[in-house]
Amino acid sequence: MTSSGFGDAAGRPAAPAPVVVSEPTEPALREAVPAEGDFERLRELLLGGERRELAAARARIEELERAQRDLPGRLPDAAVEALRSEHGNPRVAAALSEPVAQALGAAVQTHRQSLVDALFPILGPMIRKSIAEALRSLVANLNGAIESSFTVRGLKWRFEAWRGGVPYAEVVLKHRLAYGIDHVFLIERASGLVLHHASAPGLPPLDADAIAGMLTALGDFVGDSVGGDSSGALESAQVGEDLVWVEHGPRANLACFVHGVPPAQLRTLMEQRLEEVHARLLALPADAPLRSIGDDALVRERLEPSALLRDTDEATAPVAARKASRLPLLVIALLAIALLGGFAWQRWRWDARVDALRARLAAHPGFMLTGIDARAWRALTVHGLLDPDAEPLDAVLADAGLGAVVPVLDANGYVCADDAVIARRAARLLAPPASAAIAVHGRVLRLSGTAAQPWIDAALARAPWIAGVARVESTLAPTGDAVADARAEIARIVAELQARHVAFVQDDEPVAGADAVVDELAASLRRIAALAPVARVDVETVAYGSNDDSGGSEANARVRAQRAQWLERALVARGIAGARVADAAEPSDAPNRRGAELRTVVREAHR
């Protein structure tokens, strides 16, 4: 049996054959070097798995590096997405809270103006709205105070302020600012648990247990800080806009959240309610928990905010009534009555005097009253129509008895047909001599007495044309020597003219009362004009001005001319057109005074 070198037939291993190593030749070596593809296949067989893992690792590293480069751009979206998740991300919020707080603090220090500019559109309207609401409330309170200043309630508040030694505004605010009870808490003293809680309608729900725990902790802190006795207990605190009043008892405390300015009677009522609660606690069974007091219907009813408000208001009214004294109120009432009486009496006096003045003005001939504008003891204006020939109203207005009030006349001209006014108009136009008389009855003009025949003829010719005259009746008798009588009358009038003058303050500004003097001069000139034809004379009237020693010659000459011209214009305005102004070269014996006067020259008439 031939051996193959792999073992015998029995399975035993054959002895190793001797290995013969021969030196390869160069052609053999070239044939033994594998091709490039064979190396790649060998590399893939030996290192393929590791190469794929390295390629995947390299791809992941490149992806991470690319993500790291894009992180600043994706970070805001990632943060927003994390914060907008369904329940939020507490870890993100916790991580951002500290850097955001630091960033805000740094921004406030370094970019304060930027923050102000950013917050101004939000804070501005909020502040304005808050201020507007506060001002609106203040104005409402002030309006209420002003409206009630002189009412019974206002007087009562003033007396309360005087008696208590506090400003009136404080008392008004105390009464005007409405108070209310928002929440009532009944708290177990030992544990701080809520035994009962009631709120006013329309308020949002509160965490009663948390508030009770807060009040208990504050009370314990105050007690430990101040002292262990009852004087160190927390009795009041300010929480936001609410004032918290706390009443302490052996087993329970009563707390009320109040807005506004509550009266002192509320605290007394809280003490009474807390005593009632402790009485109900003593009536509980021994095995009943303390919390069951909240199910007591009487306790729930007595601790309702509306019940506390109602009972406080009922308790406040009798106390105020008991404190009030009748004597001060009586004094105030008497003073008020005296003031009102004095005001009414002064008003009655004013109205009576105005009515009397109205009656006198209505009866005054030549004046038609259209109305009176009066403010009691302050001013009075009379409106109406006044005939120029009527008696002046100065005396009537001066005798009105209106105290310091000077009546003002606002009158327009008109022609009156009353007999008295017609008589004055006829006397002005006809210029009768002293021996003749004029009377009017029922618009009938009656002429009587004696006068020169020429004047009688002129008067009878002019009388029917006088306004308001319906008929003329004459019983005039002519005098013996009409020419002599007329000349004597003219001489008398000329002497009177020389005794009158118009005074001036300065330049051409006349003194008060100058118009009355000019009226008298005009009446005298009319009389002379009426007598001149009878006396058979020509009359020339010249207006002169005069001055004192002050001023130069040129200035004085100018002032004299101005005053003479003023007098001439005043006469023309009254229907006297015959006067002329003296020339500067004409000699004048005018006295040394600031004035203007008339000089009348009478000459024989040229036939």
Image (cartoon, grey):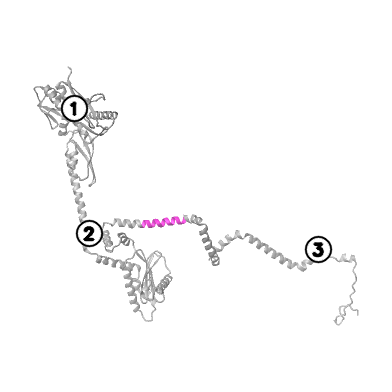
**In magenta segment, residue 194:** no
Name the residue beneath numbered marker 1: 525
Q: Which mark is residue 160?
A: none
**Which residue is at a point 22% across and 47% down the rendered structure image?**
377
Residue 466, can we see it? Answer: no
Task: Tell me: 5 left or right of 249.
Answer: right
Q: What is the three-letter code of the residue carrying label 2?
A: Ile
Q: What is the three-letter code of the residue carrying label 3?
A: Gly
**In magenta segment, residue 135:** yes
Label 3 secondary element: helix
Q: Do the residues bearing badges 2 and 3 touch, measured as CB atoms within 8 Å? A: no
Q: Residues within 10 Å of mark 2 (few under 14, many from 20)?
A: some
Secondary structure, magenta segment, majority class: helix
Q: Do the residues bearing badges 1 and 2 touch, measured as CB atoms within 8 Å? A: no
Magenta residues?
Answer: 121-137
x and y percentages locating residue 189 in the rendered image: 39, 75
Q: Out of 174 and 467, give the one closest to the viewer.
A: 174
Q: Residues within 10 Å of mark 3 (few under 14, many from 20)?
A: few
Q: Residue furthest top?
A: 607
Above-or-below relation of 383 to 321: above
Q: Do the residues bearing badges 1 and 3 touch, measured as CB atoms within 8 Å? A: no
Name the residue beneath numbered marker 2: 332
Name the residue beneath numbered marker 3: 37
| Image quadrant containing the N terminus | bottom right
Which quadrant of the view contains residue 163?
Answer: bottom left
Task: Tell me: 459 left or right of 33.
Answer: left
Q: Earlier in the sequence, mark 2 or mark 3?
A: 3
Which quadrant of the view contains residue 262?
Answer: bottom left
